[in-house]
Image (cartoon, rainbow, N blue to C red):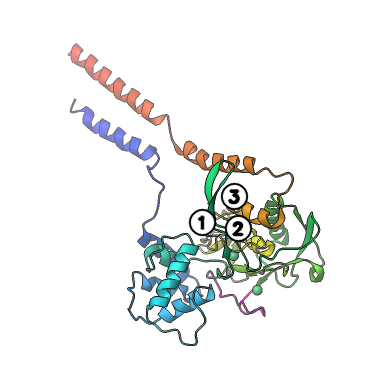
Amino acid sequence: MRSLFPFLSLMSILLLRLLPAASPARPTPGAVLLDLDDALYNSSSTTWRDFAKFLNLEKGSEVAGVCDLKRYFHRFGYLPPSDNFTDVFDSSLESALFDYQTNLGLPPTGKLDSDTIHLIMSPRCGMSDSHSHSHSHSRAAVGLHRTQHYAYFSGKPRWVRPMPVTLTYAFAPDHMIDYLSRDDIRAVFSRAFARWSKVIPVNFTETEDYPTADVKIGFYSGDHGDGEPFDGVLGVLAHAFSPENGRLHLDGAETWAVDFRTQRSKVAVDLESVATHEIGHVLGLAHSSNKDAIMYPSLSPRSKKVDLRVDDVEGVQALYGSNPDFKLSSFLEEEERETSGVADTNFRWWVPPIFLALVQAIFALKVKRTFIL
Ligand SMILES: [Zn+2]
Ligand SMILES: [Zn+2]
């Protein structure tokens, strides 16, 4: 029996390695910060990387650079303008933190905890969160209770055209990027527009006539004349204007990716994810506090999020109505299947029976040998 012990231990280790983790892998907050720092410190821009030093800073403390954090909160709509932001963690900063955490789906602690610092430092959309007129409330729909988190710009603007609406889009001829082919960029945007068209009676068609296009897309760097300068690598990734303006701008300093298998940069940003999000703004959606929604403002480098969630769908359909070919019930079923399907494929159901069979075989052999001896 003693001779079996090493074998069984080995099998147990093997079994544990093969079984899926009991809970989703989640890096420790410290590790997250280090990863992000690494990516940010290797890039050239933004003061956001310095915010890591404010981790767990107590209210009432005074530390150089807190004024930059206050400017960040002012920029995204959480603090009123001031000519004199101080370096003191005061009550106004605490209340901005509460609002920010609520708006971004974090536990509202009013503290500079690890999750909050991580999110503040993460790349995001340049649109302020303050335009958001939240529609967050629970309601029963299609037999499910869920909370709506979508929001609109103030005044709830949308494209007012006879239905079905057709909007044209064009790329700024002098504001493209040279390391991605025009065809690749066109394909990305075509897919991104199609996702929205699938759910609302709005069609998008590409035109070469840039000056007359409804939606004008381009890559711009730094100050590009619309009062919303871009900030270099990471930080702000893109912005778009509410209806019926139609401008959709991407930060030309980012490493835009159409395929992470070929674009290996640690700071690469998925073009399709950002395009899909910004088109939501073009249509009239503001930021959602649902982390899974396309309209959530933050996106990590090297991550892809292109599928509309029910929060996005319900938000945009409240503006334009539903595409007659779209069925919300099938969409919900599909979403449900995708979510539960992931866990099923990860679980190696065949491991425990094989393990037990092996143990039984070893015991049988051992018993037989005892008798022979
Ligand atoms: Zn946005
Ligand atoms: Zn712009």
Residue at 79% across / 58% down in the picture? 166
Q: Position of residue 290 (x, y in %)?
A: 52, 56
Q: Residues within 10 Å of mark 1 (few under 14, many from 20)?
A: some
Q: Disc 3 residue type?
A: Val
Q: Which sits in the foreground, 329 or 298?
A: 329
Q: Which amino acid type is marked by label 2?
A: Ser
Q: In which quarter of the image is ligand 1?
A: bottom right
Magenta residue span: 221-234
Q: Name the residue under label 2.
A: 273
**From the viewer's perspective, is the residue at label 2 or at label 1 nearer?**
1
The 10 Å Cα crowd at callout 3, few under 14, some 14 to 19, many 20 or more, is: some
Inspect the magenta stretch and tell me whether residue 229 lies in it: yes
How far is mark 3 from mark 2, CA to CA?
A: 16 Å
Q: Do the residues labelled 2 and 1 touch (CB within 8 Å)?
A: no
Residue in view at x 34 percent, y 28 percent: 355
CB contact under 8 Å: marks 3 and 2: no
Q: Does residue 354 show up magenta in the picture?
A: no
Q: Mark 1 points at which residue?
A: 291
Task: Give the residue displayed 69% in from the left and 50% down from the top.
Answer: 199
Rendered position, 89 above or below 328: below
Indicate yes or no: mark 2 CB to ligand 1 under 8 Å.
Answer: no
Residue at image location 62% in from the left, 75% down from the top = 221
**Which residue reaches farthest top?**
372
| Distance CA(mark 1)–CA(mark 3) | 12 Å
The answer to whether residue 329 shows anywhere in this view is: yes
Camera-nearest residue between 278 and 287? 287
Q: Which of marks 2 and 1 is nearer the N terminus?
A: 2
When asked about the image quadrant of residue 7, the answer is: top left
- Earlier-in-chain disc, 1 versus 3: 1
